[in-house]
Image: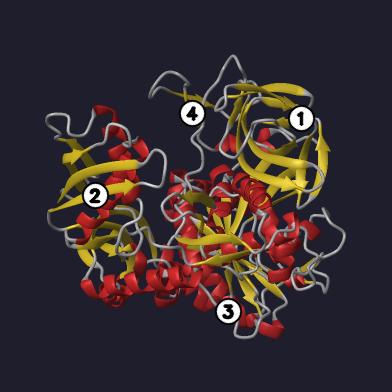
Amino acid sequence: MKAYATEKIRNVALISHGGAGKTSLAEALLFTAGAINRLGKVEAGNTTTDFDADEIKRQITISTSLAPLEWKETKINLMDTPGYFDFIGEVLSALRVADSAVVTVCAVSGVEVGTEKVWSYADQFSLPRLVFINKMNRENANFSAVMEQLRQFFGLHVFPLQIPIGQEDSFRGVVDLVKMKAMLFQEDGLSFKEAEIPDELLERATELREQLVEAAAEADDALMEKYLEEETLSETEIQTALRRGTLEGKIVPVLCGAATLNIGMQPLLDLMATALPSPADRPAAVGLLPGKEGETTERKAAVEEPFSALVFKTQADPYVGRINYMRVYSGLLNADSQVYNVNKDKMERIGNLFYMRGKTQLLTSQLVAGDIGAVAKLAVTGTGDTLADKNHPLLYPAVEFPSPVISFSLEPKTRGDEDKVSAGLARFIEEDPTFRVERNTETKQLIASGMGDMHLDVIVERLAKKFGVEVTLKTPRVPYKETIRRGAKKEGKYKKQSGGRGQYGHVFLEVNPLPRGEGFVFEDKIVGGVVPRQYIPATEKGVVEAMEEGSLAGYPMVDMRVTLYDGSYHTVDSSEMAFKIAAAMALRGAVEQADPILLEPIMNVEVTVPENYMGDIMGDLNSRRGRIQGMVPGQGLQTIKAQVPMAEMFNYAIDLRSMTQGRAFFSMTFSHYEEMPHQEMEKVIAAAKAEKKEEK
C-alpha cells in the first residue's frame, strides 16, 4: 500500500446493533475497492475482518478489526466493530481513535437498541457520521419506515441522499438525489449504469431533493442567500455544503444498499472520501504534560509536529506474539526506531511497522500523523499507553471502559492447572480491558468479571483452545460476615498433662458489639500480672484466628471489641500456644452467648432505563430485597438509584437485558454490610452446614 498524506486519510468506524451487517459491509467495500479479490460471506466463515475461530463459529464480530483500502487517491481505514454489548470495550476503543463513523442499520429491523447506544457513543466522541441502510434485498425491507425511525430517534438533520429502486427481491439500484440520476447495478455490483429516474419515483425524488438542497444551503450562508433568491445550486455547491454540514454535525447523510449483493458500495466509498473528515479536519489532540499537574498541550495532525501516538488495542497473535495497534496523532513513526512510552517511563524499540487488514500484515516503512498501524513485540507497552518523542512527552487520556456487570467464580476442571489458567487469563486481560480477574481473599475464589455471559463464555472457550485448560463458571460465594448483637463473658482454660512438661493457659474474655464497619478492637485490661505480658500477644492472636471462622456458618467475624480482663498462668507449664488455644476457646464460647448474626454486603446499584420500563424495573428491584433511594430524570431515560444485597445481583445483567430488550444498563459498587433478615440467614446457615457435611 502506497504512502498517503494526512489529508488523504479517513479513519472510519463501522458501528451498529448486532446483526445489521457491518462485517458484510466491510467485505463489500474491500471487494469494490480492489483490496480483496473475492467477496467473502459471514456464513462461510471467510470474511476478512471476522477471522478469529470464535467469530467464525458464532458468526458475530467479537474483536474490532482494521481493514484499510484505497479509493480515488484516498486511504480509508475501516474499523469493523462488534455489535453486541458484551464486547462494547472494542467499540469504545475504535471510536476513541476514529475521526468519523458509519452507522449501519438493517432495512428490516430498523433502529434497534444497539443503534441508540452506538449513536450516543459517537455523540460522546463528537464524531461526524453517515448512515447506511443495509439489507435492502431482504424480505420486509422498508426504506421509508426506517428513514422515519431514524428521524424520530436522532433528529430531523438525518437526510437521505438516495432512495432505493425496488425493495426485497426487486432491489436493483438507487436514485442519487444530488445528481438526480438513477444508478442501476450489474449483477456483481462492481459496475453500474446511470439512467433516468423511473417515473414512479420522480415525484418523491424531486420532493426529497428540495429538502436536501435546503438543508445543504443552511450549512453555508452564501448558499442560503442564493437559495432564498431562488437561484439553482450546482451539484458541486451542494456537495461542498453537504461536506461542511456533515463535518459540523448539522447533517447526517443516509445511503442505502445491500452489502451481500455488493450493491451501493461505490456511492458509499465516494461519500466517505468526500464528506467525512481527514485527521487534519479534526480538532488538535489534547494531552497532559507529565509531571505538571493539570497542564495540557495540543498536537495537530501534522508531520512537522513531534511524534505522538495512542495504543488503543492489543492482540495476542499465536505466531508473532503481542501486537499493539496505534493511532499516530502527530509527527512520523519510522520502522527500526526508538520511541518513549510515557506511561511506563521507558524507551521502546520499534521493529517492523505494518497495516493490519484483518489478520494480514501489510508492511510499511512509516506511519504518518493521522494514520493507524501496528507493531509487534514491544516490551512494556499495553492498551491505553501513549508513545511519544522523548524530548516532547505528553500523555493522552486512555479509553474509559465501563465496569464489568457480571461475575462468576472460575475453577479449573483438572487439579494442577492453576498456573495454566493464570497465564491464559493474564494474556486475555492484556487484550481486553473490560475483562477483570481477582482472587477474593474472603471466599478463596478466583472471580472472573465481564460485560455479559457471552463475553465470559468466549473467554472460557479461548482458554481451552489456546492454553489447553478447561474451566467451569459457577455463581460466586457471597462474602458474608458474622458479628454479635450483645455482650457476653466467657472463661477459656486449656490444661494438658501427659508426662513431662504440660500445657496451661487460662483467660477470661468479654465480647461486645461495635458499630457497623468498625472492624475489631482488642483491649488488654489485665491488672497485677495475672496473665504475664509475654502471653498477651498470643492471646490476641488466638482471638484473631478464631474470628476467621464464625460459629454460625463459618464466615469471618467483624465489628467486635474483645477484652482480656482476667486469667492465670503456671510458672512451668504456661506457653504462648496454650494461651492462644485458651483464647480461641473463650471467644467461641462468648460468641455463642452474644446473639450472633450474619451480615451481608449491600451494593449501590444505578439502573438507567427508558421510562416505559420504570415500573417493571422498580418492581424487580423490590423483589430482590432492594430499597429504592431515588430517581434522576434524563432525556427519555430515568436513572433509578437503589441499594440491593449482593446475593440478589449475580444474574442481574442477564435478567435486565431480558426485561428491557437490552435498552437498560446498570452499574454497581459496594456500599456497606448490614444484618440479614432472619429467614434469609437461616437459608445461608443451612447451606453452609450442608456443604460442611459434604466435605466430610
Q: Residue at x 17, y 62 (%)?
A: 595
- Which mark is drawn over residue 492? 2
The N terminus - image quarter = top right
The crowd level at tag 2 (other Cα within 10 Å; few <14, some 14-19, many 20+) is many
Task: In the rendered view, tell whether residue 6 sits above or below residue 180.
Answer: above
In the rendered structure, which amino acid carries the disc numbered 3? Val
- 3D distance between C-alphas at marks 1 and 2: 77 Å
Q: Position of residue 444 (x, y in %)?
A: 47, 54
- 3D distance between C-alphas at marks 4 and 1: 23 Å
- 3D distance between C-alphas at marks 2 and 3: 76 Å
Mark 4 or 3 closer to N-term?
3
- Which mark is drawn over residue 386? none
Task: Using the image as rendered, state which of residue 472 and residue 658 is in the foreground.
Answer: 472
- Which mark is drawn over residue 366? 1
Task: Using the image as rendered, state which of residue 647 and residue 121 is in the foreground.
Answer: 647
Q: Secondary structure at mark 1?
A: strand
Q: Residue at x 18, y 40 (%)?
A: 567
Q: Residue at the front extreme?
A: 499
Report which residue position mark 4 lands on. 287
- Viewer-side label of 1, 2: 2
Instruction: Give the image quarter of residue 261.
Output: bottom right
In the rendered structure, which amino acid carries the disc numbered 1? Gln
